[in-house]
Image (cartoon, rainbow, N blue to C red):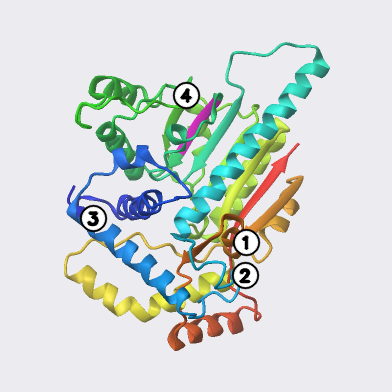
Amino acid sequence: MPSDALSSVARTAYVVASTRLVDSNRPAALIQDAPLSAMVPDTEELRTQQQAQVQWLQRLVEGLQQGKPLLEQGSRMEHADIKDTLAVSIVGLRCRYVDDELLAALHRIRRKLAARLREAGEGGSQRPNIQAVMLGAGLDTRPWRLELGHDISWFEVDLPDMTAFKRERMKHGGLTAAAASGDCNADLFTDLAATNGGEAGGKAGISLRVASWAAVAADLEGGGWLAQLEACGFDPSLPTVWVAEGLVYYLPQPAVDNLIEDITAVSKRAQLGAVILTSSNPTYNRSIRLWREKIAQGLAAATASGKSALGWPSLTASLGFEPHIKLQQAGWHAAWSVTLADLEVMYRVVHHPSLARTPELDAIRQQAREECGDKLGEYHVVTATMG
């Protein structure tokens, strides 16, 4: 697929997907993503991007073996610990942890529901009774990749351009789907049934691993997305796990605050649920904006030459320096957060851009810290539970 045919949003999702594919195709990978491999065409552009990322990771490991310091001062991995370990992207690292937190949240809700049924003296129900909502889904493949369970109704919310692009990629890869109770994707299911495996070269379809799937084309910056979600079968009275991976820094701060308020209100109504979000703190955001200013002229030249630009995140919104506290203050009962440094230790990997430090990058990071109360720039994954 020619890159010029993609919107900036779809192109960004395409590049993130290629990064995830690099991580999933490496030995001892943290994630395996066969559905994504089927969805993303094997183009020369993709192979070039993947090769560049592989070379980047190789340089990182070589630098660490030579004793070069890490870029991130918050990293707690020792050089001896990472001599023979795996280097992954931030995308791959956060993806694996979100996978683990999602599965844990779903199991927790199942236990709570089972206890409630026992107390009420009721039997189980064959009807799906847990929902998962992926906000800013992009080319996420969890409903096909993970054994989430057939008591799960899965919903995705993303911009109309992105939703249409994913629909096309699903047809290409032969991903099957089952409709939720709403009819917002009726034509998609007809298309998938008619073309299952067609564009994918006659391969057997990749089966959905949840009870149902629905994609909602909506703008999370504006109001009304919850109503659109309900029109596609979402039931606000049921327990829900909300996931927003790599989304917050694309939105303005008021939109993030409204989003947290909305999903908190729905979860309070259901009296049971969870939310999993990624958020970079103000120092991290400022350092990336400063770095981006350094390369702005080159980006402007690339755009002027006719190359498609990425949908760069605004990097203005954040859940702050202690995101778990922000969620507790919003009304969630329990919350915790981890940083990339924590995840490196948990999964025994090192992430790029933990590249060898340079004077220019050191200066950018120091300037950002000085502007943000001398606090270290960190990228968090935060989880909160209700009930």
Kindly indicate whether the residue at mark 2 contacts the one at mark 4 (C-beta within 8 angstroms).
no
Kindly indicate whether the residue at mark 1 contacts the one at mark 2 (C-beta within 8 angstroms).
yes
Is residue 112 found inside the magenta-colored segment of the image?
A: no
Q: Main secondary structure of the magenta part?
A: strand
Q: Disc 4 marks which residue?
A: 212
Using residue 98 as the reference point, say whether residue 335 is left or right of it: right
Task: Report helix, strand or loop for mark 4.
Answer: strand
Query: At 34% across and 78% down in the image, what residue appears?
Result: 295
Q: Disc 3 marks which residue?
A: 47
Kindly indicate whether the residue at mark 3 contacts the one at mark 1 (C-beta within 8 angstroms).
no
Q: Give the range drawn in magenta.
A: 152-156
Q: Disc 2 marks which residue?
A: 76
Q: Which of marks 4 and 2 is nearer the N terminus?
A: 2
Q: Earlier in the sequence, mark 2 or mark 3?
A: 3
For badge 2, the amino acid type reads Arg
For badge 4, the amino acid type reads Ser
